[in-house]
Amino acid sequence: MLALAPDASASKAGQGLASPRSWSGLGQDERAVWGLCQGSGKKPYQTQVDLSEPAFKCSCPSRKFPCKHALGLLLLWAASGEVPVAPRPVWVEEWLASREQRAERAAVRAEQPVKPPDPAAQAKRAAQREERVAAGVGELRQWLSDLVRRGLAEAQREPWQFWELTAARMVDAQASGLATRVRRIGNAPYSAGDAWAERMLEEASLLQLLGEAYERRELLSEPTQADVRQLVGWSVPTEEVLAGERVRDTWAVVGQVVTEDERLRSQRTWLRGETTRRDALILLFAPAGQVLDPGVVFGTAVDAELVFYPGAAPLRALVADRHGDPVVLERLPGYASVADALAARAAVLALNPWLDRFPVALRGVVPARVGERWALVDPSGGALQLARRRDWWELAAVSGGHAIDVFAEMDGEELTVISAASERRVVLL
């Protein structure tokens, strides 16, 4: 049951609610279990679990899925006989009925014959999009020139609407990737602290480089063209990716990050090959509240075949096939020194300068305070600073002052540690 928890804090909180004292109106039948859990508000939260999948719903405002109330209810139902058999309340009946209706509509759609695509219509749509994107890129490059000409100090004072308006134009031009990067420029004064000018200039420069690369894409190699098109906003069909070359190895699942807002849930799962020494990223998206399954489990090593998305330095991948059962990791694979990790990052950035996150796996490092900052220090004294936005006492506690293995994401010059291994145990942070 705890494997359904979105993170360690939700798991711990769910276990704390797995007691009849936390609930009223408990009930169950062959299909569902439900109950009312008093939260901080006046009304108790209506929590329900469809046991056939399972699926969850709770009236609490939590963005985690399942939330701690749903986990607590499920744990209580599974571990004790405290949940009586009872008639379903109206709110449970309505939820289950809506789920059945959605399933029926999906079944009807699945039975309908699929019309073969019209090649002429596809070609026309593709040509129209190329024209829209080309126009959007031209407009964006002029906008960037005006931005730099006016100066960063002037840009810093612009309201968010200024940036959002240009981003919306890129969306209209069917270049959503460019829209995302416009917003990053506008966000720099709020996210980069005293280094806002450097961050803003860096983001604007990378966007200018991307626009120029798109306009001259015929001169680029095929892998770099693939990178540029994906960064601008084109997606690669899954079936096209799966038709590519398969890379078989024993892949250590070294990290996993889940983020969620009101509409979208995203999940990054990082792997590292034992023989190939390649890093791989399984990136999944779904509507908020849905569980995402990358096909592998954090903290294990699995014999699997991956296929990588096209690019000059392929990183994103899909799991094509698995062989045998996974084994539990006791250590994290990685570089022996900070210098080795930085050299690997430099080699990748030379091929793809737009890479947002670089996976950094280090063995035998010690988290320590270096001046006013936390850093990871290797045996030779090489150090990488950790992100300011978190306090790292939890990581220091895992270390206990001793060398540990870590896996982190590198954004610019800072690291955010995702997982660590100490005393033959791998944990998410």
Image: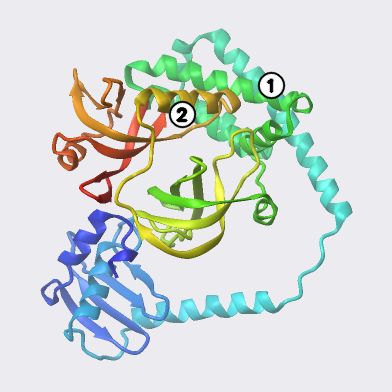
Element carrying mark 1: helix
Residue 59 x/y as whole percent? 31, 66
Q: Is residue 355 left or right of residue 172?
A: left
Residue designated by label 2: 160
Label 1 CA crowd tier, 10 Å (few <14, some 14–19, many 20+): some
User: What's the amino acid at mark 2?
Assistant: Trp
Tag 1: amino acid:
Glu
Q: Which mark is residue 212?
A: 1
Q: Position of residue 220 (x, y in %)?
A: 73, 26
Q: Does 149 sit left or right of 41 as displayed?
A: right
Residue nearest the viewer, comparing 241 with 153:
241
289 up-or-down from 74: above or below: above
In-front residue for pair 422/187: 422
Q: Residue furthest left?
A: 21
Q: Position of residue 69 (x, y in %)?
A: 25, 66
Q: Residue at x 79, y 27 (%)?
A: 218
Q: Quadrant of the N terminus?
A: bottom left
Q: Quadrant of the C terminus?
A: top left
